[in-house]
Amino acid sequence: MDNSFNRSRQPKGVPAGGEFASTPHAESSLKLQIPTAPAPQGLDGLAAATPTVIDTELAELYYQQAKAAAWTSGFESTIARYEKRGGSAPGHLYESLAEAARAEAEVQATIKPFEAEYTRRGGWTRFFMVMNNGGHLHSSRSCSTCRPSTQFGWMPAYSGQDEAGVVGLAGEDSCTVCFPSAPVDQKSMLPFRVAEREEAAEAAAEKETRAVKAASERVVVGRKVYKTVRGAENEVGWQVECMISSRYHQAADAAHRAGLDANAAKYYAEAREIGEAIAVTVPGYDVDALLTKKFETKAKMLRKSGFPMPEDAALEGPVV
């Protein structure tokens, strides 16, 4: 089964190489770097190493092996395309293929003593997490519920630990084929799952806070809803500007004047209605102060633009 380790799909909060890997390893360039094993070297050193130390290194080594194998396969495919067309691939591709193959072989050679130590001890418990939504915890990468393409995250922090304890911690995350007695009715308490739930709860709380804040700033005027007080105040300014334009516009005759006056009264009433709605949202809000301020601001702006407006014009002043 060609199941591989995929860092790009590592669960949030779980470092590459395992849930408790100390540091992430840098990505290799074309010239694959063979990692230096942090575990004790030599048979005596490996014999003293804990399952977690050995499996943490193996997780990284298998990742490097999969990466080297991908490079090898890629170069082979590229060369095959050239040859299929009856030509020869550029020389550097053959060199790169040889380099990738050497890197793969070197990683495999580095892996052997670690796996040999695992075999010498008769093995120990190992745990692998499937890296997708709803993925489960498995005892190996050979579970019948998985596919050859399934991506796993090795969890060496739990290597060698009591299976019942780890499965109990994983709860609903446990594979019932690998662990038939898994307590799947219990929430997973694996650290990265706990972190996911905490982050989700924080995000939900923040969303609720934003919703409450937005609701508290909403200004309702009949069927019209202003999302913010500022938006409602801007509308008051527009209504006041329309009121001024109607009130002080030069009428052609009495009928025209009556129409302008009616419009001015309507705009003023709408401005005040919005202001009073703001006061419902903001206790103690001074509606008259808002209307006066908007009138002064708009009057200044209109005068500056050349609009014929008397100097003694007031919010509720006489029509001219």
Image (cartoon, grey):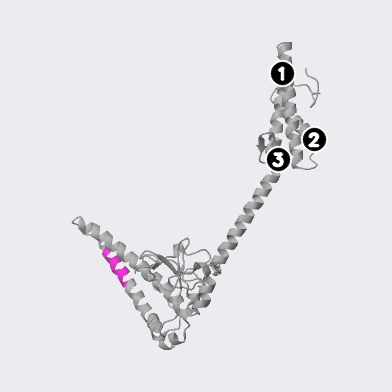
In the image, is residue 85 above or below residue 185? above
Give the magenta part as a residue range. 93-102
Question: Which label was assigned to residue 260?
Answer: 1
* Amino acid at dot 2: Ala
1 and 3 marks in contact (CB < 8 Å): no
Report the Cα–Cα distance between label 1 and label 3. Answer: 29 Å
Q: Which is more N-terminal, label 3 or label 2?
A: 3
| Amino acid marked by disc 1 | Leu
Q: Distance between the residues labelled 2 and 3?
A: 15 Å
**Residue 289's mark?**
2
Q: Quadrant of residue 126?
A: bottom left
Q: Which of 113 and 89 is in front in this view?
A: 113
Count of numbered marks: 3
Of mark 1 and mark 3, the one earlier in the sequence is 3
Residue 228 placement, left or right of 109: right
- What is the chief secondary structure element of the magenta stretch? helix
Q: Where is residue 277 in the image (x, y as percent from the top left)?
A: 74, 36
Tell whether 296 sits left or right of 116.
Answer: right
Figure check: 164 above or below 195: below
Tag on residue 229?
3
